[in-house]
Protein backbone atom coordinates (compact mmCIF):
# COMPACT_ATOMS: atom_id res chain seq x y z
CA UNK A 1 0.00 0.00 0.00
CA UNK A 2 1.40 3.37 -1.05
CA UNK A 3 0.36 6.28 1.17
CA UNK A 4 0.73 9.82 -0.19
CA UNK A 5 0.18 12.77 2.16
CA UNK A 6 -0.62 16.14 0.59
CA UNK A 7 -1.23 19.54 2.10
CA UNK A 8 -4.97 20.01 1.64
CA UNK A 9 -8.13 18.95 -0.19
CA UNK A 10 -7.31 20.88 -3.36
CA UNK A 11 -3.93 19.19 -3.67
CA UNK A 12 -5.55 15.81 -2.94
CA UNK A 13 -8.12 16.33 -5.69
CA UNK A 14 -5.48 17.36 -8.22
CA UNK A 15 -3.24 14.41 -7.36
CA UNK A 16 -6.07 11.90 -7.63
CA UNK A 17 -7.36 13.53 -10.79
CA UNK A 18 -3.93 13.41 -12.39
CA UNK A 19 -3.55 9.69 -11.66
CA UNK A 20 -6.88 9.00 -13.36
CA UNK A 21 -5.99 11.33 -16.24
CA UNK A 22 -2.72 9.46 -16.76
CA UNK A 23 -4.60 6.16 -16.93
CA UNK A 24 -7.11 7.50 -19.47
CA UNK A 25 -4.30 8.82 -21.63
CA UNK A 26 -2.38 5.54 -21.54
CA UNK A 27 -5.49 3.38 -21.97
CA UNK A 28 -8.34 5.32 -23.62
CA UNK A 29 -10.74 2.37 -23.29
CA UNK A 30 -10.05 1.79 -19.61
CA UNK A 31 -12.72 0.81 -17.09
CA UNK A 32 -13.12 3.01 -14.03
CA UNK A 33 -14.85 2.17 -10.77
CA UNK A 34 -16.34 5.38 -9.40
CA UNK A 35 -17.37 6.61 -5.98
CA UNK A 36 -19.76 9.28 -4.72
CA UNK A 37 -19.89 11.49 -1.64
CA UNK A 38 -18.17 14.74 -0.81
CA UNK A 39 -14.56 13.63 -1.18
CA UNK A 40 -14.48 12.78 -4.94
CA UNK A 41 -16.10 16.08 -6.01
CA UNK A 42 -12.78 17.85 -6.53
CA UNK A 43 -11.38 14.87 -8.42
CA UNK A 44 -14.34 14.90 -10.81
CA UNK A 45 -13.98 18.66 -11.26
CA UNK A 46 -10.34 18.09 -12.20
CA UNK A 47 -11.33 15.50 -14.83
CA UNK A 48 -13.95 17.86 -16.28
CA UNK A 49 -11.32 20.60 -16.52
CA UNK A 50 -8.88 18.26 -18.29
CA UNK A 51 -11.64 17.24 -20.72
CA UNK A 52 -12.57 20.86 -21.47
CA UNK A 53 -8.90 21.67 -22.03
CA UNK A 54 -8.73 18.88 -24.62
CA UNK A 55 -6.27 16.84 -22.57
CA UNK A 56 -8.46 13.72 -22.38
CA UNK A 57 -11.48 12.11 -23.97
CA UNK A 58 -13.72 9.65 -22.14
CA UNK A 59 -15.69 8.47 -25.17
CA UNK A 60 -14.29 4.93 -24.91
CA UNK A 61 -14.12 4.74 -21.12
CA UNK A 62 -16.48 2.44 -19.22
CA UNK A 63 -17.59 3.19 -15.66
CA UNK A 64 -19.08 1.16 -12.82
CA UNK A 65 -20.33 2.96 -9.73
CA UNK A 66 -19.84 1.46 -6.32
CA UNK A 67 -23.35 1.80 -5.00
CA UNK A 68 -26.78 3.39 -5.04
CA UNK A 69 -29.34 4.23 -2.38
CA UNK A 70 -32.57 2.33 -2.23
CA UNK A 71 -35.80 4.26 -1.51
CA UNK A 72 -34.84 7.16 -3.84
CA UNK A 73 -35.88 7.62 -7.48
CA UNK A 74 -33.05 8.32 -9.90
CA UNK A 75 -34.40 11.86 -10.31
CA UNK A 76 -33.89 12.62 -6.60
CA UNK A 77 -31.16 15.20 -6.07
CA UNK A 78 -29.37 12.88 -3.61
CA UNK A 79 -29.49 9.72 -5.71
CA UNK A 80 -26.05 8.64 -6.81
CA UNK A 81 -27.31 8.44 -10.38
CA UNK A 82 -28.11 12.15 -10.19
CA UNK A 83 -24.83 12.89 -8.37
CA UNK A 84 -22.78 11.34 -11.16
CA UNK A 85 -24.79 13.08 -13.89
CA UNK A 86 -24.48 16.48 -12.22
CA UNK A 87 -20.81 16.25 -11.27
CA UNK A 88 -19.21 14.31 -14.12
CA UNK A 89 -21.23 12.55 -16.79
CA UNK A 90 -23.08 15.56 -18.24
CA UNK A 91 -19.82 17.50 -18.57
CA UNK A 92 -17.69 14.99 -20.51
CA UNK A 93 -18.11 12.76 -23.56
CA UNK A 94 -18.82 9.47 -21.79
CA UNK A 95 -21.27 7.38 -23.79
CA UNK A 96 -24.45 6.58 -21.83
CA UNK A 97 -24.22 2.91 -22.77
CA UNK A 98 -20.78 2.75 -21.10
CA UNK A 99 -22.11 4.00 -17.76
CA UNK A 100 -23.21 1.47 -15.13
CA UNK A 101 -24.94 2.37 -11.86
CA UNK A 102 -27.09 -0.02 -9.81
CA UNK A 103 -30.78 0.60 -10.44
CA UNK A 104 -33.02 0.63 -7.36
CA UNK A 105 -36.04 2.20 -9.04
CA UNK A 106 -39.05 0.00 -9.91
CA UNK A 107 -37.08 -3.23 -9.77
CA UNK A 108 -36.45 -6.19 -7.50
CA UNK A 109 -33.29 -5.29 -5.52
CA UNK A 110 -32.01 -8.86 -5.46
CA UNK A 111 -32.48 -9.22 -9.21
CA UNK A 112 -30.57 -5.97 -9.69
CA UNK A 113 -27.77 -7.14 -7.37
CA UNK A 114 -27.41 -10.33 -9.41
CA UNK A 115 -27.44 -8.44 -12.71
CA UNK A 116 -24.95 -5.82 -11.54
CA UNK A 117 -22.68 -8.54 -10.21
CA UNK A 118 -22.86 -10.32 -13.56
CA UNK A 119 -21.83 -7.13 -15.35
CA UNK A 120 -18.96 -6.57 -12.94
CA UNK A 121 -17.72 -10.10 -13.38
CA UNK A 122 -17.78 -9.71 -17.16
CA UNK A 123 -15.49 -6.66 -16.95
CA UNK A 124 -12.13 -5.81 -15.42
CA UNK A 125 -11.93 -2.54 -13.54
CA UNK A 126 -8.58 -0.89 -14.23
CA UNK A 127 -8.85 1.62 -11.39
CA UNK A 128 -11.34 1.64 -8.53
CA UNK A 129 -11.79 5.02 -6.83
CA UNK A 130 -12.83 4.84 -3.17
CA UNK A 131 -13.65 7.09 -0.28
CA UNK A 132 -13.81 5.79 3.27
CA UNK A 133 -16.52 6.10 5.90
CA UNK A 134 -15.80 7.18 9.44
CA UNK A 135 -16.47 3.59 10.54
CA UNK A 136 -14.06 2.24 7.93
CA UNK A 137 -16.63 1.24 5.32
CA UNK A 138 -15.82 1.23 1.61
CA UNK A 139 -18.69 1.46 -0.82
CA UNK A 140 -21.56 0.68 1.52
CA UNK A 141 -19.81 -2.40 2.92
CA UNK A 142 -20.43 -1.79 6.60
CA UNK A 143 -18.41 -3.27 9.50
CA UNK A 144 -18.89 -7.03 9.64
CA UNK A 145 -19.13 -7.46 5.85
CA UNK A 146 -17.29 -10.57 4.71
CA UNK A 147 -14.25 -9.96 2.52
CA UNK A 148 -15.74 -12.60 0.18
CA UNK A 149 -19.00 -10.67 -0.30
CA UNK A 150 -20.05 -9.74 -3.84
CA UNK A 151 -22.72 -7.19 -4.87
CA UNK A 152 -25.51 -7.18 -2.31
CA UNK A 153 -28.39 -5.34 -0.68
CA UNK A 154 -27.11 -3.79 2.55
CA UNK A 155 -28.66 -2.06 5.53
CA UNK A 156 -26.92 1.21 6.33
CA UNK A 157 -25.59 1.60 9.85
CA UNK A 158 -26.86 4.45 11.99
CA UNK A 159 -23.34 5.92 11.94
CA UNK A 160 -23.35 5.97 8.13
CA UNK A 161 -26.81 7.51 8.03
CA UNK A 162 -25.72 10.21 10.49
CA UNK A 163 -22.61 10.91 8.38
CA UNK A 164 -24.79 11.32 5.28
CA UNK A 165 -27.46 13.40 6.99
CA UNK A 166 -25.63 16.56 5.88
CA UNK A 167 -26.79 15.90 2.32
CA UNK A 168 -30.48 15.71 3.33
CA UNK A 169 -32.94 17.97 5.11
CA UNK A 170 -33.21 15.56 8.06
CA UNK A 171 -32.11 12.14 9.22
CA UNK A 172 -35.58 10.82 8.44
CA UNK A 173 -34.90 11.39 4.74
CA UNK A 174 -31.65 9.39 4.66
CA UNK A 175 -32.28 5.95 3.13
CA UNK A 176 -31.89 2.86 5.28
CA UNK A 177 -30.56 0.55 2.56
CA UNK A 178 -28.50 0.48 -0.61
CA UNK A 179 -27.13 -1.79 -3.32
CA UNK A 180 -23.34 -1.91 -3.18
CA UNK A 181 -20.41 -3.70 -4.73
CA UNK A 182 -19.03 -6.21 -2.27
CA UNK A 183 -15.47 -6.22 -1.01
CA UNK A 184 -14.68 -9.14 -3.32
CA UNK A 185 -15.72 -7.02 -6.33
CA UNK A 186 -13.57 -4.11 -5.17
CA UNK A 187 -10.51 -6.30 -4.67
CA UNK A 188 -10.72 -7.60 -8.25
CA UNK A 189 -9.78 -4.18 -9.65
CA UNK A 190 -6.31 -3.97 -11.16
CA UNK A 191 -5.55 -0.90 -9.05
CA UNK A 192 -7.32 0.90 -6.21
CA UNK A 193 -7.15 4.58 -5.31
CA UNK A 194 -8.56 5.64 -1.93
CA UNK A 195 -8.86 9.32 -1.03
CA UNK A 196 -9.64 10.85 2.36
CA UNK A 197 -9.76 14.42 3.64
CA UNK A 198 -10.31 16.07 7.00
CA UNK A 199 -9.71 15.28 10.64
CA UNK A 200 -12.91 13.24 10.79
CA UNK A 201 -11.20 10.58 8.68
CA UNK A 202 -7.97 10.44 10.72
CA UNK A 203 -9.01 7.51 12.92
CA UNK A 204 -10.22 5.30 10.09
CA UNK A 205 -7.12 6.07 8.01
CA UNK A 206 -4.90 5.09 10.94
CA UNK A 207 -6.87 1.85 11.29
CA UNK A 208 -6.59 1.22 7.54
CA UNK A 209 -2.83 1.69 7.42
CA UNK A 210 -1.66 0.42 10.80
CA UNK A 211 -4.49 -1.52 12.44
CA UNK A 212 -5.27 -5.23 12.23
CA UNK A 213 -6.87 -6.58 9.06
CA UNK A 214 -10.42 -7.22 10.20
CA UNK A 215 -13.96 -7.32 8.85
CA UNK A 216 -14.86 -4.84 11.58
CA UNK A 217 -12.92 -2.24 9.55
CA UNK A 218 -13.85 -3.19 5.97
CA UNK A 219 -11.25 -0.91 4.37
CA UNK A 220 -8.45 -3.01 5.87
CA UNK A 221 -9.25 -5.62 3.20
CA UNK A 222 -7.36 -3.32 0.84
CA UNK A 223 -4.11 -4.44 2.49
CA UNK A 224 -4.71 -7.81 0.80
CA UNK A 225 -4.39 -6.12 -2.62
CA UNK A 226 -0.99 -5.54 -4.23
CA UNK A 227 -1.72 -2.22 -5.99
CA UNK A 228 -3.38 0.29 -3.66
CA UNK A 229 -2.65 4.02 -3.44
CA UNK A 230 -4.03 6.06 -0.55
CA UNK A 231 -4.00 9.86 -0.86
CA UNK A 232 -4.75 11.81 2.30
CA UNK A 233 -4.45 15.44 3.31
CA UNK A 234 -2.56 16.46 6.43
CA UNK A 235 -5.68 16.46 8.58
CA UNK A 236 -6.66 12.91 7.59
CA UNK A 237 -3.06 11.76 8.10
CA UNK A 238 -2.85 13.23 11.62
CA UNK A 239 -2.80 9.86 13.42
CA UNK A 240 -0.40 8.05 11.09
Image (tube, rainbow, N blue to C red):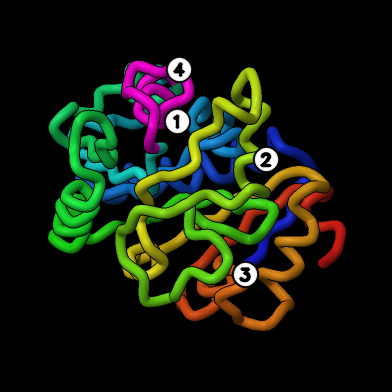
Cβ atoms at labels 2 and 4 below 8 Å apart:
no
Observer-nearest residue: 237 or 54? 237
Report the Cα–Cα distance between label 2 and label 3.
16 Å
Q: Indicate which disc, 2 or 3, sits on the residue closer to the N terminus.
A: 2
Q: Which mark is residue 86?
A: none
- Circle 4 SS class: loop
Observer-nearest residue: 212 or 156? 156
Report the Cα–Cα distance between label 3 and label 4.
30 Å
- Circle 2 SS class: helix
Q: Residue at x 46, y 50 (%)?
A: 129
Label 3: how many residues lie within 10 Å, few (<14), some (14-19) or many (20+)? Answer: many
Q: Indicate which disc, 2 or 4, sits on the residue closer to the N terminus.
A: 4
Q: Residue at x 52, y 57 (%)?
A: 138
Disc nearest the viewer among 2 and 1 = 2
Q: Is residue 111 visible?
A: yes
Q: Which mark is residue 217?
A: 3
Magenta range: 70-86
Cβ atoms at labels 2 and 3 below 8 Å apart:
no
Q: Is residue 16 magenta?
A: no
- Circle 3 SS class: loop
Disc nearest the viewer among 3 and 1 = 3
Report the Cα–Cα distance between label 3 and label 1.
30 Å
Q: Indicate which disc, 4 or 1, sits on the residue closer to the N terminus.
A: 1
In the picture of the structure, the residue carrying the numbered disc 4 is 77
Q: Indicate which disc, 3 or 1, sits on the residue closer to the N terminus.
A: 1
Residue 83 at x, y percent in the picture: 43, 25
Report the Cα–Cα distance between label 2 and label 4.
17 Å
In the picture of the structure, the residue carrying the numbered disc 2 is 163
Q: Is residue 72 magenta?
A: yes
In the picture of the structure, the residue carrying the numbered disc 1 is 47
Amino acid sequence: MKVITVRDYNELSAKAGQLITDLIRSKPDCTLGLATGGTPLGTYQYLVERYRAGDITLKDVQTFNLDEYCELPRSHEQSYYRFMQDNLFLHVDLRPENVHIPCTEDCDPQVQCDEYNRLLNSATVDLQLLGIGSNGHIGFCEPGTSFDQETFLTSLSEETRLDNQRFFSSLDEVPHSAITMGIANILRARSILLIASGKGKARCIADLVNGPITEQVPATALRLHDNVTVIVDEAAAALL
